[in-house]
Amino acid sequence: MAASSEPNSREDIFDSSLNLEETHLKEGYNEGYADDLVSGEEEGRQVGLKTGFEVGEELGFYRGCIDVWNSAIRVDSNCFSSRVVRSIKQMEELLNKYPISNPEDESVSDVMDSLRLKFRAICATLNVKLEYNGYPKSSDGGNIQF
Amino acid sequence: MSLVDESFELKELQVLEGHADRVWSVAWKPATGFDGVPAVLASCSGDKTVRVWEQSPSSGSFQCKAVLEETHTRTVRSCAWSPSGKLLATASFDATTAVWEHVGDDYECVSTLEGHENEVKSISWNASGSLLATCGRDKSVWIWEVLPGNEFECVSVLQGHTQDVKMVQWHPNMDILFSCSYDNTIKVWAEDGDDDWHCVQTLAEANNGHTSTVWALSFNATGDKMATCSDDLTLKIWGSDLLTIQSGNGSAPWKHICTLSGYHDRTIFSVHWSREGIIASGAADDAIRLFAEDGDGLVDEPKYHLLLKKDKAHDMDVNSVQWSSAGNRLLASASDDGTIKIWELISLAGDQKPPL
């Protein structure tokens, strides 16, 4: 393509029609990006609200259970075995350790898993079934029987 | 007594009928079957019941002495006697583990352990009877402490397996727990003081492990070898240094010793090592196979050979094989065909080898 000594204005005219596809591509991309920035942020906000609510609900539930158990221990220090008392204390430490203000902290799932295990062990020993609507279950559905 | 040059026959003594659905597991009651004490066997089934069978001292045949029913609401998958024989634990698909005590002529359910989210697959008592382990489809392994008055306290809930855990088994001498799973691995769990249990070793494909579901595991009498069986059609033998295990200094690592392949062409569901060193396997091809260690293998590289194969031991899949610990060479097997069979291992006179 000869481009040596043509006047600038003529180059510009041809350039813009030659690069039409690329121009339109760029325009489309920018439009899409801007649109999605808005809707993506909104979707992210919804997910954040939902997850935040669920995490808060679960942690609050554990806080409530621990508070009740601690109160029982204060009233009668022998109401639970030493193992259960120790487990409640460990669960409380885990709860305090949960990085509630920093959702991007990598340990969130580990701490939550440990909390759930401790909670299940305590409930099993006390022989109580404590849960609430929407309490996460780790098992999959299905009916395999071997 | 050398098992190498002898030839054997597995003689069918009796067929125990009564269960209305497949029989999943059998367990011999400890301290029975010798010194005048009649042998006792428990079996559990898809019919939601557990049956206790006792051998008659006069006729030698087994009769059903008790039916433990109306407690579990689904299949009873596994049963295990406590080392003293006083308690019988039963694991069910109804997500509970029931503990029964022999009271007079009957068995009474004295405790129910809840905690698993779904089907419980296996239970095991430790050597002293102070701990009980359970495992299930929810991928977790639970350890319970046995307290006075038939109270049970949950010591720990162990996560680590990524799939259904098929069996748990305590080491015969040490409080070390082994589990095997649909995730193809065997895990070893030990306590780091004060209820702090964690996985100290995983035997996976990379360690010469199984390439499909591991269904069962069994220890030899001394506890320095372990046999595992799998859907990958092999039996694997693992070993550990006995002295290191016993010193309790950290855990002695388990190493692959040998793989028995080419003997089974369907899934092997059960394996059990007798006190004399004979390994029995029960498989999906309805057969029972017996293996023994070669006499001329090296100490560090023992080899095993097929002692005999019992074709059509049952009409359907053999789910469980269990040697009696009474030294009477009795073997019990349980099958999808709804029956339990009692076998006796008989050594044949002379050098006649029976056809395989």
Image (cartoon, grey):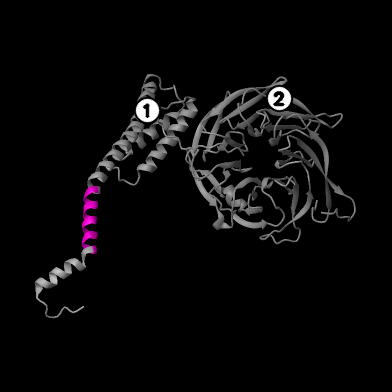
Quarter of image, res B216: top right
The percent coordinates of residue B157 (x first, y second) are 49, 37
Q: Secondary structure at mark 2?
A: strand
Q: Amino acid at mark 2?
A: Val
**Chain to which mark 2 belongs:** B
Residue B292 colored magenta?
no
- Report crowding for label 2: few under 14, some 14 to 19, many 20 or more residues within 10 A (C-alpha): some
Amino acid type at circle 1 is Ile
Which of these two is toward me, B100 or B51? Answer: B51
Image quarter (top left, top right, bottom left or bottom right) of the C terminus of chain B? bottom right
Q: Main secondary structure of the magenta part?
A: helix
Q: CA distance from mark 1 to mark 2?
A: 42 Å
Q: Residue B352, relative to residue A72: is it above or below?
A: below
Circle number at residue B6: none
Q: Residue furthest right?
A: B350
Disc 1 crowd, CA 10 A, few/some/many (<14, 14-19, 20+):
some
Residue B95: quadrant of the picture: top right
Q: Is residue B97 or residue B20 the one in the foreground?
A: B20
Mark closer to the observer (1, 2) = 2
Q: In the rendering, at what x and y percent does residue A54 appear?
A: 34, 34
Task: Give the magenta part as a residue range.
Answer: A21-35
**Residue B36 occupies which quadrant of the picture?**
top right
On screen, residue B172 above or below B154 = below
B264 and B29: which one is in front? B264
Please give the residue where the numbered disc 2 appears in the rendered image. B67
Give the residue number, with chain letter if any, for mark 1. Answer: A66
